[in-house]
Amino acid sequence: EDQVTQSPEALRLQEGESSSLNCSYTVSGLRGLFWYRQDPGKGPEFLFTLYSAGEEKEKERLKATLTKKESFLHITAPKPEDSATYLCAPGTTDSWGKFQFGAGTQVVVTP
Amino acid sequence: DAGVIQSPRHEVTEMGQEVTLRCKPISGHNSLFWYRQTMMRGLELLIYFNNNVPIDDSGMPEDRFSAKMPNASFSTLKIQPSEPRDSAVYFCASSLTGREAFFGQGTRLTVV
Protein backbone atom coordinates (compact mmCIF):
# COMPACT_ATOMS: atom_id res chain seq x y z
CA GLU A 1 0.00 0.00 0.00
CA ASP A 2 1.30 3.45 -0.91
CA GLN A 3 2.25 5.56 2.08
CA VAL A 4 3.38 9.14 2.55
CA THR A 5 4.98 10.25 5.80
CA GLN A 6 5.96 13.81 6.63
CA SER A 7 8.27 14.71 9.47
CA PRO A 8 8.45 16.36 11.82
CA GLU A 9 4.77 16.96 12.52
CA ALA A 10 5.56 20.40 13.85
CA LEU A 11 8.60 22.67 13.81
CA ARG A 12 9.21 25.85 15.73
CA LEU A 13 12.06 28.02 14.43
CA GLN A 14 13.61 31.30 15.37
CA GLU A 15 13.78 33.80 12.54
CA GLY A 16 16.96 33.06 10.58
CA GLU A 17 17.26 29.48 11.88
CA SER A 18 17.45 27.20 8.83
CA SER A 19 15.91 23.74 8.87
CA SER A 20 14.57 20.94 6.66
CA LEU A 21 11.28 19.12 6.35
CA ASN A 22 11.03 15.56 5.14
CA CYS A 23 8.52 13.76 2.93
CA SER A 24 9.16 10.04 2.64
CA TYR A 25 7.08 7.67 0.58
CA THR A 26 6.71 4.01 -0.23
CA VAL A 27 5.10 4.18 -3.64
CA SER A 28 5.58 2.25 -6.83
CA GLY A 29 6.30 4.08 -10.02
CA LEU A 30 6.98 7.58 -8.68
CA ARG A 31 6.38 10.02 -11.48
CA GLY A 32 6.57 13.31 -9.64
CA LEU A 33 6.19 14.95 -6.28
CA PHE A 34 4.32 18.14 -5.41
CA TRP A 35 4.93 20.52 -2.52
CA TYR A 36 2.27 22.91 -1.23
CA ARG A 37 1.99 25.39 1.63
CA GLN A 38 -1.22 26.07 3.49
CA ASP A 39 -1.95 29.14 5.59
CA PRO A 40 -4.64 28.97 8.29
CA GLY A 41 -8.11 29.39 6.86
CA LYS A 42 -6.95 29.06 3.27
CA GLY A 43 -6.62 26.39 0.63
CA PRO A 44 -3.22 24.85 -0.12
CA GLU A 45 -1.02 26.85 -2.46
CA PHE A 46 1.29 25.20 -4.99
CA LEU A 47 5.05 25.55 -4.49
CA PHE A 48 7.00 23.02 -6.56
CA THR A 49 6.85 19.93 -8.71
CA LEU A 50 9.88 17.62 -8.81
CA TYR A 51 10.08 14.89 -11.41
CA SER A 52 13.34 13.02 -11.03
CA ALA A 53 15.86 12.02 -8.38
CA GLY A 54 18.52 14.68 -8.00
CA GLU A 55 16.26 17.49 -9.13
CA GLU A 56 16.19 20.69 -7.09
CA LYS A 57 13.91 23.72 -7.25
CA GLU A 58 14.10 26.99 -5.37
CA LYS A 59 11.71 29.78 -4.52
CA GLU A 60 12.87 32.58 -2.27
CA ARG A 61 13.97 30.91 0.99
CA LEU A 62 12.64 27.48 0.03
CA LYS A 63 14.51 24.73 -1.79
CA ALA A 64 13.01 21.34 -2.59
CA THR A 65 15.07 18.26 -3.42
CA LEU A 66 14.12 14.76 -4.48
CA THR A 67 15.62 11.30 -4.06
CA LYS A 68 14.14 7.93 -4.94
CA LYS A 69 12.61 7.50 -1.49
CA GLU A 70 12.12 10.97 -0.09
CA SER A 71 11.96 14.67 -0.67
CA PHE A 72 13.25 17.50 1.47
CA LEU A 73 12.05 21.05 1.75
CA HIS A 74 14.84 23.23 3.05
CA ILE A 75 13.96 26.57 4.60
CA THR A 76 16.95 28.92 4.66
CA ALA A 77 16.97 31.87 7.07
CA PRO A 78 13.20 31.72 7.54
CA LYS A 79 11.04 34.72 8.27
CA PRO A 80 7.75 34.82 10.19
CA GLU A 81 5.85 34.89 6.89
CA ASP A 82 7.17 31.41 6.16
CA SER A 83 4.97 30.12 8.97
CA ALA A 84 2.51 27.67 7.40
CA THR A 85 1.75 23.99 7.04
CA TYR A 86 3.77 22.37 4.29
CA LEU A 87 2.23 19.43 2.45
CA CYS A 88 3.67 16.97 -0.03
CA ALA A 89 1.89 14.74 -2.54
CA PRO A 90 3.74 12.08 -4.54
CA GLY A 91 2.24 11.11 -7.85
CA THR A 92 2.67 7.66 -9.33
CA THR A 93 2.17 6.26 -12.79
CA ASP A 94 -1.06 4.64 -11.65
CA SER A 95 -2.32 7.68 -9.77
CA TRP A 96 -0.90 10.44 -11.93
CA GLY A 97 -3.13 13.49 -11.78
CA LYS A 98 -4.66 12.45 -8.48
CA PHE A 99 -3.28 14.37 -5.48
CA GLN A 100 -3.12 12.51 -2.18
CA PHE A 101 -1.33 14.50 0.48
CA GLY A 102 0.75 13.64 3.49
CA ALA A 103 -0.31 14.89 6.92
CA GLY A 104 1.91 17.95 6.63
CA THR A 105 4.50 19.73 8.76
CA GLN A 106 3.34 22.78 10.67
CA VAL A 107 6.10 25.39 10.74
CA VAL A 108 6.07 28.36 13.10
CA VAL A 109 8.78 30.99 12.72
CA THR A 110 9.10 33.43 15.60
CA PRO A 111 10.78 36.84 15.39
CA ASP B 1 -8.97 34.07 -13.96
CA ALA B 2 -10.62 34.34 -10.56
CA GLY B 3 -9.34 30.94 -9.48
CA VAL B 4 -11.41 28.11 -8.10
CA ILE B 5 -14.61 29.47 -6.62
CA GLN B 6 -16.46 27.67 -3.85
CA SER B 7 -19.76 28.49 -2.25
CA PRO B 8 -20.87 28.94 0.39
CA ARG B 9 -17.80 29.88 2.45
CA HIS B 10 -19.52 28.89 5.66
CA GLU B 11 -22.48 26.59 6.26
CA VAL B 12 -24.16 25.76 9.52
CA THR B 13 -26.88 23.16 9.37
CA GLU B 14 -28.80 20.85 11.62
CA MET B 15 -28.20 17.14 11.75
CA GLY B 16 -30.32 15.33 9.20
CA GLN B 17 -30.50 18.21 6.74
CA GLU B 18 -29.21 18.06 3.19
CA VAL B 19 -26.12 20.10 2.43
CA THR B 20 -24.90 21.06 -1.04
CA LEU B 21 -21.46 22.51 -1.64
CA ARG B 22 -20.65 24.13 -4.95
CA CYS B 23 -17.49 24.57 -6.98
CA LYS B 24 -16.55 26.42 -10.14
CA PRO B 25 -13.16 25.23 -11.42
CA ILE B 26 -10.65 27.30 -13.34
CA SER B 27 -11.66 27.62 -16.96
CA GLY B 28 -9.82 25.13 -19.16
CA HIS B 29 -8.93 22.75 -16.37
CA ASN B 30 -10.08 19.19 -16.98
CA SER B 31 -9.51 17.61 -13.57
CA LEU B 32 -11.50 18.40 -10.45
CA PHE B 33 -11.03 17.22 -6.89
CA TRP B 34 -13.06 17.37 -3.70
CA TYR B 35 -11.19 17.18 -0.39
CA ARG B 36 -12.19 17.18 3.26
CA GLN B 37 -9.85 18.56 5.93
CA THR B 38 -10.04 17.94 9.65
CA MET B 39 -7.50 18.18 12.43
CA MET B 40 -7.70 14.45 13.04
CA ARG B 41 -7.49 13.15 9.47
CA GLY B 42 -5.73 15.90 7.59
CA LEU B 43 -6.52 16.57 3.92
CA GLU B 44 -8.44 13.62 2.49
CA LEU B 45 -9.23 13.16 -1.19
CA LEU B 46 -12.92 12.34 -1.53
CA ILE B 47 -13.42 12.15 -5.28
CA TYR B 48 -11.56 12.93 -8.49
CA PHE B 49 -13.17 13.84 -11.82
CA ASN B 50 -11.44 13.91 -15.17
CA ASN B 51 -13.26 15.44 -18.15
CA ASN B 52 -16.43 15.56 -16.02
CA VAL B 53 -16.33 11.81 -15.35
CA PRO B 54 -15.77 10.47 -11.81
CA ILE B 55 -12.52 8.51 -11.95
CA ASP B 56 -11.99 7.59 -8.32
CA ASP B 57 -14.57 7.96 -5.56
CA SER B 58 -12.91 5.56 -3.15
CA GLY B 59 -12.46 8.37 -0.63
CA MET B 60 -16.16 9.12 -0.35
CA PRO B 61 -16.88 8.07 3.22
CA GLU B 62 -20.44 6.82 2.92
CA ASP B 63 -23.44 6.65 0.65
CA ARG B 64 -24.62 9.84 2.29
CA PHE B 65 -22.02 11.64 0.19
CA SER B 66 -22.48 12.17 -3.54
CA ALA B 67 -20.74 14.35 -6.10
CA LYS B 68 -21.67 15.43 -9.59
CA MET B 69 -20.04 17.34 -12.39
CA PRO B 70 -22.72 18.10 -14.96
CA ASN B 71 -20.38 20.23 -17.08
CA ALA B 72 -16.81 21.47 -17.19
CA SER B 73 -17.58 24.59 -15.17
CA PHE B 74 -19.54 23.29 -12.22
CA SER B 75 -19.49 20.58 -9.59
CA THR B 76 -21.45 19.82 -6.44
CA LEU B 77 -20.81 17.76 -3.35
CA LYS B 78 -23.95 16.75 -1.51
CA ILE B 79 -24.36 15.27 1.95
CA GLN B 80 -27.75 13.80 2.75
CA PRO B 81 -28.49 13.40 5.61
CA SER B 82 -25.75 15.37 7.32
CA GLU B 83 -24.26 14.30 10.66
CA PRO B 84 -22.13 16.19 13.22
CA ARG B 85 -19.08 14.12 12.25
CA ASP B 86 -19.27 15.61 8.75
CA SER B 87 -18.18 18.94 10.21
CA ALA B 88 -14.98 19.90 8.40
CA VAL B 89 -13.55 22.23 5.79
CA TYR B 90 -14.30 21.02 2.29
CA PHE B 91 -11.99 22.07 -0.53
CA CYS B 92 -12.45 21.91 -4.25
CA ALA B 93 -9.40 21.98 -6.53
CA SER B 94 -8.85 21.86 -10.27
CA SER B 95 -5.94 21.19 -12.60
CA LEU B 96 -4.88 20.32 -16.07
CA THR B 97 -4.39 16.57 -15.74
CA GLY B 98 -1.00 15.86 -14.26
CA ARG B 99 -0.20 19.49 -13.55
CA GLU B 100 -0.37 21.29 -10.24
CA ALA B 101 -3.79 21.64 -8.67
CA PHE B 102 -5.25 24.97 -7.60
CA PHE B 103 -7.46 25.08 -4.56
CA GLY B 104 -10.48 27.14 -3.67
CA GLN B 105 -10.87 28.92 -0.36
CA GLY B 106 -12.92 26.10 1.09
CA THR B 107 -16.33 25.71 2.69
CA ARG B 108 -16.39 25.41 6.47
CA LEU B 109 -19.28 23.09 7.31
CA THR B 110 -20.66 22.82 10.80
CA VAL B 111 -23.40 20.28 11.50
CA VAL B 112 -25.10 20.77 14.85
Image (cartoon, coloured by chain):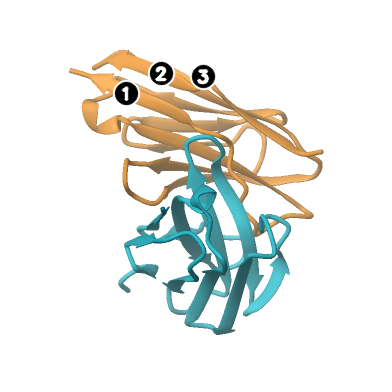
The residue identified by callout 2 is: A11
The chain displayed cyan equals: B
Q: Is residue A111 above or below residue A35?
A: above
Tag 2 and tag 3, C-beta contact below 8 Å: yes
Give the spatial CA distance, label 1 vs label 3: 12 Å
Q: Chain of mark 1?
A: A
The chain displayed orange equals: A
Find residue A58 and report its horizontal and vertical position in percent: 42, 36
* Secondary structure type for disc 3: loop
* For marks 1 and 3 on the same chain, the one whose residue lies earlier in the sequence: 3
Give the spatial CA distance, label 2 vs label 3: 7 Å
Q: Which mark is residue A108?
A: 1
* Secondary structure type for disc 2: strand
Q: Chain of mark 3?
A: A
Say what amino acid the circle numbered 3 marks.
Answer: Pro
Mark 3 is surrounded, within 10 Å at the Cα level, by few (under 14), some (14 to 19) or many (20 or more) other residues, namely some
Tag 1 and tag 2, C-beta contact below 8 Å: yes
